[in-house]
Image (tube, rainbow, N blue to C red):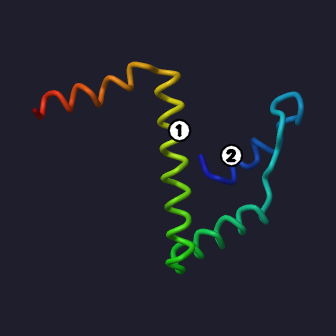
């Protein structure tokens, strides 16, 4: 299935019935592309992006451990085996 096929199927959906929000614009795609180029080409922007991603990842891991307590025991087992 091509991206054009997927786009066509999404366009057939009825907002509010099949989904609640529809954001499918060329402007959004272009903005994301320009942002990715900025990240690749500017070390300062890349450093800030990496810091945001790391912070988000750490928060997500904390939330996951609250939702799935078994995750917090996985790292502890590895630490005990190394000793």
Distance of label 1 from label 2 (alpha carbons):
29 Å
Q: Which residue is drawn at 84% across and 34% down?
A: 20
Q: Relative to 31, does residue 24 appear above or below in the rendering? A: above
Work out whether residue 5 or residue 28 is closer to the camera in this orientation and state it: 28
Q: Residue at x 46, y 27 (%)?
A: 65
Residue 3 placed where, x, y %? 64, 53
Residue 21 placed where, x, y %? 83, 40
Residue 18 placed where, x, y %? 82, 30
Work out whether residue 55 or residue 9 is closer to the camera in this orientation and state it: 55
Total number of numbered discs in the rendering: 2
Q: In this view, does 78 lie to the left or right of 30?
A: left
Residue 6, labelled with which disc?
2
Question: Which quarter of the image is occupied by the C terminus?
Answer: top left
Q: Relative to 74, does residue 13 appear above or below in the rendering? A: below
- Looking at the image, which residue sits at the far front? 83
Q: In the rendered image, which residue does mark 1 sit on? A: 60
Work out whether residue 27 or residue 53 is closer to the camera in this orientation and state it: 53
Q: How crowded is mark 1: few (under 14 residues within 10 Å), some or many (20 or more)?
A: few
Tag 1 near tag 2, CB within 8 Å? no
**Which is in the foreground here, disc 1 or disc 2?**
1
């Amino acid at each position: 299935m091509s991206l054009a096929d997927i786009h066509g199927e999404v366009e057939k959906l009825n907002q509010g019935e099949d989904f609640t929000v529809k954001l499918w614009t060329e402007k959004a795609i272009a903005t994301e592309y320009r942002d990715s180029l900025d990240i690749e080409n500017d070390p300062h922007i890349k450093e800030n992006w990496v810091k945001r991603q790391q912070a988000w990842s750490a928060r997500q891991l904390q939330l996951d451990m609250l939702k799935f307590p078994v995750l917090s025991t996985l790292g502890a087992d590895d630490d005990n085996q190394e000793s």
